[in-house]
Image (cartoon, rainbow, N blue to C red):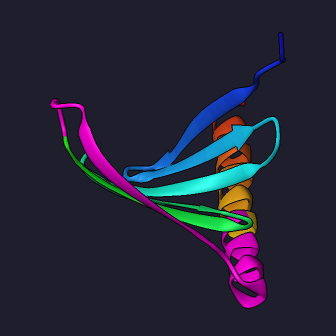
Amino acid sequence: MGLRFYRRIKVLPGITLNIGKTGVSTTIGTRGAHVTVAKDRTRRTIGLPGTGLSYTRSERAGAGRAALTTLVIVVVLAVVFAASLAIGTALA
């Protein structure tokens, strides 16, 4: 049996940071339509909430695209870290 690890952190309304055993990704969107950007791929999903029906399209990223998505992930991580520091100092 394999070990699984997955964590979702809500950064802002409509933006989620996804942390898993093999990597990090960012999801932007709401129920019914969202885009997930990871280091090497982008996944677009549209669906009808509450019905279980959805369509997902996944594309592998080229070298330039991979660098851009890595930058996006690093920026989101920096924002999360800064927000957690701000909350921590506000509570102290």
- In the current view of this chain or complex, which residue is farthest to the top? 1
Horizontal relation, residue 59 to residue 45: left or right: right
Q: Is residue 54 above or below residue 29?
A: above
Q: Is residue 30 visible?
A: no
Instruction: Residue at 83%, 17% (x, y): give it.
Output: 2
Q: Is residue 76 left or right of residue 10?
A: right
Answer above or below: position of 31 versus 70.
above
Percent x, y for residue 51?
16, 31
Estimate the x, y position of residue 45 in percent, counting from the top left: 36, 55
**Quadrant that contains the N terminus:** top right
User: What is the quadrant of residue 69 in the picture?
Assistant: bottom right
Residue 90 coordinates in the image, percent (x, y): 64, 39
Give 83 or 57, whichever is nearer the viewer: 57
Toward which corner of the image does residue 46 lie, by quadrant?
bottom left
Q: How many marks?
A: 0
Q: Is residue 6 above or below residue 26?
A: above
Identify the magenta region.
Answer: 49-73
- Say which residue appears at 77% left-offset and 81% top-offset: 67
Viewer-proximal residue, 50 or 73?
A: 50
Image point 16% across, 30% down: which residue? 50
The answer to whether residue 14 shows anywhere in this view is: yes
The quarter of the rendered structure image containing the C terminus is top right
Horizontally, is 43 left or right of 64 in the view?
A: left
Identity of the residue drawn at 58% across and 38% down: 9
Indicate the quadrant where residue 3 lies: top right
